Amino acid sequence: DIQMTQSPSSLSASVGDRVTITCRASQNVFNYSAWFQQKPGKAPESLIYDASNLRRGVSSRFSGSGSGTEFSLTISSLQPEDSATYYCQQYSRYPVTFGPGTKVEIK
Amino acid sequence: EVQLVESGGGLVQPGESLRLSCAASGFTFTSYWMSWVRQAPGKGLEWVANIKKDGSETHFLDSVKGRFTISRDNAKNSLSLQMSSLRAEDTAVYFCARGGSYSDFWGQGTLVTVSS
């Protein structure tokens, strides 16, 4: 199975800060990666697919980059509503796997 | 508006069976693979299974192979997950999701608790 790791596991930042979360795959997943946001008690919401494509309706302050084994999610200007856990995912090979999550808190 | 509404969760004993359902609306159901993804309490996301648009192909997480079956009724815009020989480690919120690998819309989930 392809293992996905994320760093950091948690972070605390101020409103307006630029925040970057990194995800690494144990094998080449090409650009078959995605990012999800999950708030407590809610379903995950898709943010980014195919490594860098913003899902329709998602704020443009979210962006994704990378390919192969290294990916990143950037929030250009952190907002209070961005407090959540963020998961990366690979869908290059079965089983589809997710990273362990990064918890983002607002200072 | 895309809607996915799961039902069928509950408390069962180890070894018992349970069937989850997902009612889909707001999109052309037959145009999409569909998936189930679960989340154990306080844990991360774990993909469970998916099914092709016409139901002709399925894939499963190794730990549920032979115990879980995924199916769909395209006439009723419905997705199902039949779970048997349930174990404590199957305890989780089960989400129905649109898409076979990357899923762009998710339901709110239904809680399955396996405990004696």
Image (cartoon, coloured by chain):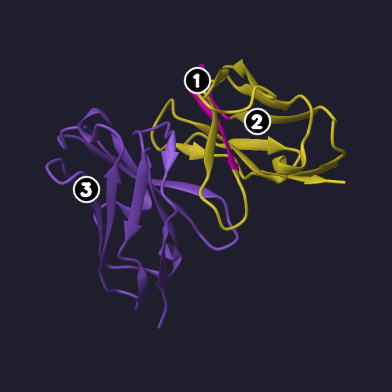
Question: Which range is magenta?
Answer: A26-37
**Parent chain of label 2:** A
In percent of width and height, residue A90 lies at 50, 30
Dot 2 alpha-carbon crowd within 10 angstroms: few under 14, some 14 to 19, many 20 or more: many
Report which quarter residue A85 is drawn in.
top right
Residue B85: mark: none
Give the label, 1 or 3, closer to the camera: 3
Dot 3 alpha-carbon crowd within 10 angstroms: few under 14, some 14 to 19, many 20 or more: some
Q: Is residue A68 visible?
A: yes
Can you identify the residue that label 1 sits on?
Answer: A50
**Parent chain of label 1:** A
The residue lying at 24 percent from left, 31 percent from top is B28
Q: Gap between marks 3 and 2, in whole Å?
A: 34 Å
Vertical relation: B17 (above or below) A95: below
Can you identify the residue that label 3 sits on?
Answer: B78
The chain coloured yellow is: A
Vertical relation: A34 (above or below) A15: above
